[in-house]
Amino acid sequence: MSGQRKIIHIDADSFYASVETREKPALEGKPLAVGGRADRRGVIATANYAAREFGVRSAMASSRALALCPPLLILPPRFEIYRAVSAQFHAIFADYTHLIEPLSLDEAFLDVSDCEQFQGSATLIAADIRRRVRQELGLTVSAGIAPNKFLAKVASDWQKPDGMYTIAPDQVAAFVLTLPVNKINGVGRVTAEKLRRMGVQTCGDLQQLPLETLVQRFGKYGQRLHDVARGIDHRQVQTSRLRKSISVERTYAQDIDLMPAMIAQVDELLLELAARFRKIADRYFPTKRVIKIKYSDFTQTTLEEVIGDSGEPWNDAAAFHRLVTTAWPRGAKPVRLLGAGLRVQPLGEGEVDQMSLFEDEPQPAS
């Protein structure tokens, strides 16, 4: 990869569930998930591969997971342990490079372009990281190696679990031709369907569309689609990731269908939000208030407003009440989840990461 950036994407295999199995070896081989209780409308955060064979997936309702896999054991999350293990991952990474971009507790990008170990071979470096994680931490990680972040992330999923895949610079053009467009970060079900209607299912198909057409149909994201379809991604590994939001949300055991009850729950959320914001108030200031509502049929809506300069506090309860009373009629159905949050900006200059609001950390129901 001489003359090219050398990027490794490391992704732990069913991280939370694997940590729990390491701590309790008797669980080995059994269908296991980490998440919230089914009787409290919990959600699966992570499922091991034995559970995935039954169709259990992350973000699935725990009740649905149990219907698919009756022997499934669902454990409550223990984030203090997961954070400690994540720190051990990063201590290993730091032996190879200081250019580390954490994406979550269980995955990160590493730029090893200037690493001299293993004669600068990114593939051999990734193999050694995987060896050390297995030997020192008793866990497995998958790795993707490529000239950029987009391709490295795709590659890390290519031979999961416990796998590794390298896309060398001279392989990029051929690799992307048959790559399904739903492997592109940001191409979800709706965008994939729009592209399908345009005759696009692979990046090779996408290459046939003019940039002007993509920008017209998808706005600024059209440029991104145009580039990654050709294996182009100029994003640098960012060692300093700054927030752009902070939030709390709760799923309720029983649907809420009366506005006074929703307002009461918003007040409780604001207490927790205030406690979380105090931890970062010396580094960030709030710019917008946000309310999230998920209805009983799993449709959802969000509404936000700019925090004015009139001196009103960010946590003005009346302002959040106004948001929820305005947002709820959009679906006008019983509510299974409420969230309250803030858009924030750093005090001083800095590049903000792309972490989405209400996605700071999995929040299964207790």
Image (tube, rainbow, N blue to C red):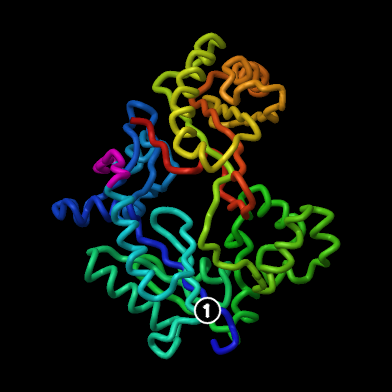
Rate crowding at label 1 as few (under 14), some (14 to 19) or many (20 or more) other CA atoms within 10 Å.
many
Q: How many marks?
A: 1
The percent coordinates of residue 287 (x first, y second) are: 65, 35
118 versus 182 height, above or below: below
Q: What residue is shown at x 37% (from left), y 31% (from top)?
A: 365
The quadrant the N terminus occupies is bottom right
The image quarter containing residue 214 is bottom right
Q: What residue is shown at x 65% (from left), y 17% (from top)?
A: 322
The percent coordinates of residue 300 (x first, y second) are: 59, 31
Range covered by the magenta-colored residues: 70-80
Q: What residue is shown at x 62% (from left), y 49% (from top)?
A: 189
Left or right: residue 120 versus residue 220 is: left
77 versus 311 height, above or below: below
Q: What residue is shown at x 60% (from left), y 26% (from top)?
A: 314
Q: Which residue is mark 1?
A: 6
Is 153 in front, or is 242? 242
The quadrant the C terminus occupies is top left
The image quarter containing residue 197 is bottom right
Indicate whether residue 77 is drawn in magenta. Answer: yes
The percent coordinates of residue 233 (x first, y second) are: 65, 69
Mark 1 residue element: loop
Query: Disc 1 marks which amino acid?
Result: Lys
Left or right: residue 183 versus residue 69 is: right
Left or right: residue 268 versus residue 132 is: right
Is 54 in front, or is 43? 43
312 versus 81 height, above or below: above
Is 237 in front, or is 310? 310
The percent coordinates of residue 146 (x first, y second) are: 53, 76
220 versus 246 height, above or below: below
